[in-house]
Image: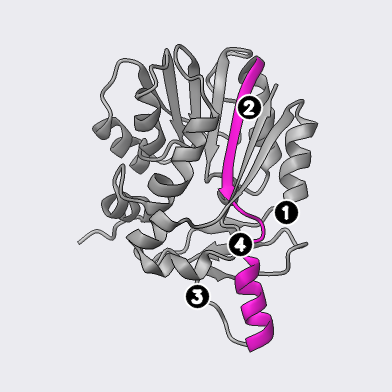
Amino acid sequence: MKKQSWQEKWNATYGLNKDPNRELLLFPLLLNISKPIKGKLIADLGCGNGSLVVKLLRYAPKKIYGIDFSSNFLKFATDNIRDKRVTFIKSDIRRRLPLKSNSVDIVYCTFVFNETKNINLILKEVSRILKKRGRFYLMTTHPFFPMKYYLYEKYTGKKNDKILNVKGYFENFEGKFNLTMAKQTPPFYHHRVEDLINSIINNNLSIRRVNELSTNKKMINADPRYKEQSDMPKVILISAEK
């Protein structure tokens, strides 16, 4: 029997709407602050299985380009979503994107930066494809989140089982994120807050808003295990404009 990839396992577990983090915490805020969406041309960088694309379609966009490097995720996305307003493209978002300069109204990039060593390469392309006054929404693991595991190791002398090879906040380390349900460890790149902010500014984008998100009551009600994470930021959401 062929071993499932972590993308296959993740999709089988969460599908389009079963991830409490996205459904109960992240997407509601993201979609609310990124209005208006109607009539806009959108690029979703690192679209995965299309979980955000499905939500965006409810707001009547003109066109959505879902871009991902993973053949597995793109297969799930194309199987899940059949809408003439959506085009899925296989492309490495760290390289030049197959989209025209100054052509896109809104760019989303969710949970990709921690899988990427050089985030500047992505932001350079974001800036290129965005129209003047186009909007960019970045959502990624909060840079402080790995520090829970770093401090655990520092003060107990034991290894944690979530972010492997974790180091201190000021080190741009490459670790491994232990996907328990997939029993696999994809790469995890740690970027500081200043790395995120400065890379955005240095690529001619103006930051408009920053949100630090933790668990909420809906998540805890759905799964009480989230309560132990309620005193720390899990995700950072940065809104910017060209």
Dot 1 amino acid type: Arg
Q: CA distance from mark 4 to mark 1?
A: 11 Å
Is 57 in front, or is 125? 57
Residue 199 locus on image (x, y percent)? 75, 38
Tag of residue 145: 4
Secondary structure state at the residue bearing disc 1: loop
Marks 4 and 2: which is nearer the front?
4
The image shows residue 31 at horizontal and vertical percentages of 47, 32
Q: Residues within 10 Å of mark 3 (few under 14, many from 20)?
A: few
Q: How much space separates mark 4 and mark 2, taking CA atoms?
A: 25 Å
Q: Secondary structure at mark 4?
A: loop
Of the residues tagged 4 and 3, which is closer to the observer?
4
Amino acid type, label 4: Phe
State the separation of the CA atoms marked 1 and 2: 20 Å
Q: Which mark is residue 161?
A: 3
Q: Which residue position is annotated with label 2?
A: 126
In the rendering, at what x and y percent does residue 221 appear? 35, 61
Taking the spot 50% from the left edge, 75% from the top edge, the residue there is 161
Residue lying farthest left? 1
Please say if the residues under marks 1 and 2 sit with CB atoms less than 8 Å apart. no
Q: Secondary structure at mark 2?
A: helix
Q: How is the image coloured?
A: one colour
**Residue 57 percent location from the top left of the image:** 36, 24
Left or right of residue 78, residue 166 in this image: right
The N terminus lies in quadrant: bottom left
What number of labels is visible? 4
